[in-house]
Amino acid sequence: MQHLVSMKHLTEEEIMAILDRADTFKKRGVRELPGKYSVSNLFFEPSTRTKMSFEMAQRKLGLDVLPFESSFSSTLKGETLYDTVKTLEAIGVDALVIRHPEDGYYEQLIGRTSVSIINGGDGSGQHPTQSLLDLFTIKEEFGSFQELNVLITGDITHSRVARSNADALTKLGANVTFLCPAEWAGEFNSVDSWDEVIKNSDVVMLLRVQHERHEAEITFAGESYHERYGLTEAREQLMKENAIIMHPGPFNRGVEIADTLIECPKSRIFKQMENGVYIRMAVLETVLKGRN
Ligand code: CP
């Protein structure tokens, strides 16, 4: 595998190989990559988890990491993404992690550069390493994906996490249900009430309400988003005993999830962030070794 840009491109075997490799990194500690590789992280949108955990993964693998700050780069002089990537290719970078606001930004790059591209999130498109760390966290908990009931709830239409996970979980045999206001469902079918789904869900995956992408204050027939669609303490009480709560972060406390549930016994939210480092080590190793 020379690039990782979308979960749609991964076979079940490729997904499982990355999860297994991440498990080895988690259980047996750090293995430096033989040979030196240079990488850089090009983030044109804000990030804490993805950027920092890629940097941690890169350091653990012994990679040379070239710092790049989009706000101090020639992007501000109008340089295009393509020209930025070609410049870093000429300088000698082997792989780039890129987060960019444009859906499918990577299509202008693949086949036109020898640099490997790892997608750190494109607009409302895909976020493959978030999906892989979510899958890793679910597999750690349940052992497999077959017939698991996964409920994804929140701002589905704007969510690259929802899109990536829907593709991957369905491929792996899980049953995926979406819960959200109908106008936020995008291309997916959704349900409108927790009553139908809360008691049967093995995984409740909450997504951030992306306030920056909504123009008006969000209310539903007099109810707040939290009352109508959020995971409240009362709803958490209805979950199966061994069900888990996930959220990719960053979270809006008291909006999609009650403040008190973020670190409750069912929550795996900070476990997801921890697992992100091992998944990103596995992805970096797979992509760098897969270069022609
Ligand atoms: N989950 C996630 O992508 O978080 P960041 O935006 O902080 O990277």
Image (cartoon, rainbow, N blue to C red):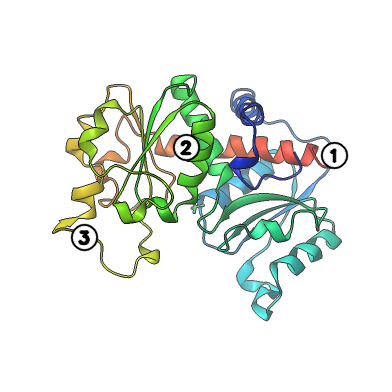
What residue occupies the far left of the structure in this picture?
222
State which mark lies toward you, 3 or 2.
Answer: 3
* Residue 12 locus on image (x, y percent): 61, 28
Residue 35's label in the rendered image is 1
Contact flag, marks 3 and 1 (Cβ < 8 Å): no
State the quadrant of the N terminus. top right
Q: Position of residue 245 (x, y in %)?
A: 35, 35
Amino acid type indicated by mark 3: Thr
Query: In the rendered structure, which disc, 2 or 1, sits on the residue that comes first in sequence?
Result: 1
Eyeballing the image, is 186 above or below 63? below
Query: Mark 2 highlights which residue?
Result: 272
Amino acid type, callout 2: Gln
Q: Which residue is outermost to the top?
A: 143
In the displayed structure, 38 sits above or below 43; it is above
The secondary structure type at the circle numbered 3 is strand
Q: Relative to 142, is 172 on the left or the right?
A: right
Could you say where residue 5 lies in the image, as x and y percent from the top left?
A: 65, 48
Task: Give me the residue at 43% from left, 56% from top.
Answer: 158
Q: Nearer the viewer, mark 3 or mark 1?
A: 3
> In front here: 69 or 236?
236
Residue 252, given in percent of the width and then of the height, sits at 33, 53
Q: CA distance from mark 2 to mark 1?
A: 30 Å
Question: Which of label 2 and label 1 is nearer to you?
Answer: 2
The answer to the question of whether label 3 and label 2 lie on touching residues, with beta carbons closer than 8 A, is no
Mark 1 residue CB less than 8 A from any atom of ligand 1:
no
Give the Cα distance between marks 3 and 1: 55 Å
